[in-house]
Image: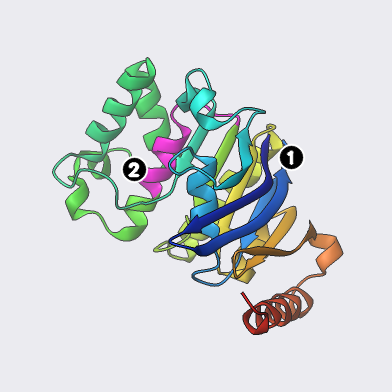
Amino acid sequence: MLEFHRVTKTYNAMKVLDDVSFTVPPGTVTGFLGPNGAGKSTAMRILAGLSRPTSGSATVLGRPYAELEGPGSQVGTLLDAGAQHPGRSGREVLTLGAMMLGLPRSRVDEVLELVGLSGKEGKRVVGGYSLGMRQRLGIAHALLGRPKALILDEPANGLDPQGIRWMRELLRGLAGAGCAVLLSSHLLYEVEQVADRIVMIGGGRVLAQGTLAEFGQGRSLERTFLDLTAQADRSPA
């Protein structure tokens, strides 16, 4: 569903991504783990068609994002929860999105209910939302078109424990229905609770990847992550 094939990205002679390759199969949640500055957001922006790789390819459903027909109904993205007009209500933001996708207004009600922003919360202006509410709104926007794939950059930021449990159940349900989910985070424990597969990145390079069972859980996953990122920091550029 989602695939990186030898993706390299260079800015001003600095290599931000270095030969990145991995896939996100349908019906799975893939946790994309790495410290801040590891290259996660850059990789996801390339996948979502917001940046071009210097070399290699990133595809969604077998094609570059820019070549998809009606991409909003095939892949949902949440890359920046703050990128919504602060003067519009949550309902207005989603209504505009639904109009662009040619969806009925009833879909707005469905996603507002799904993310817990129905009623007065949906009528409030986004400028008055907490970060957690903005995250929920961003997830709702990503789900408008009932996509087959989801690209989510740090969606747990700002969510309280109840919100994190809700997100976990939501993503597991979507994967169970066949959706391919790529979920970036630097929070090992939260990814461990929801992911089927793990991709660890550091210094712009994929350090390891595999199923959660292959990595081990709890302290084993944390130790592997810390050891690999420490090795990446010591490696020459």
Magenta: main secondary structure: helix
Question: In the picture provided, is 56 more to the left or to the right than 211?
Answer: left
Name the amino acid type tagged 1: Pro
Q: Which part of the image, by quadrant, shows the N terminus?
A: top right
Between marks 2 and 1 in the image, the one whose residue lies nearer the viewer? 1
Query: Which is nearer the eye, 158 or 169?
Result: 158
Tell me the number on the disc at residue 15: none
* Residue holding disc 1: 25
Q: What segment carries the magenta color?
A: 136-148
Where in the figure is residue 159, as x and y percent of width and height? 42, 61
**Residue shown at 66%/84% (left/top)?**
234
Q: Position of residue 214 (x, y in %)?
A: 86, 63
Q: Which mark is residue 117?
A: 2
- Figure quadrant of residue 51: top left
Residue found at x 72% / y 59%: 198
Membership of 141 in magenta stretch = yes
Relative horizontal placement of residue 44, taking residue 119 as reference (left or right): right
* Residue 169 spot, x, y in % from top left: 60, 49
Closer to us: 56 or 182? 56
User: Mark 2 vs mark 1: which is more N-terminal?
Assistant: 1
Height in image: 38 above or below 173?
A: below
**Crowding at mark 2 (Cα within 10 Å: few <14, some 14-19, many 20+):** many
Q: Is residue 149 visible?
A: yes
- Relative to 236, does residue 119 appear above or below in the rendering? above
Q: Is residue 233 above or below residue 89?
A: below
Q: Could you tell me which secondary element the residue under label 1 belongs to?
A: loop
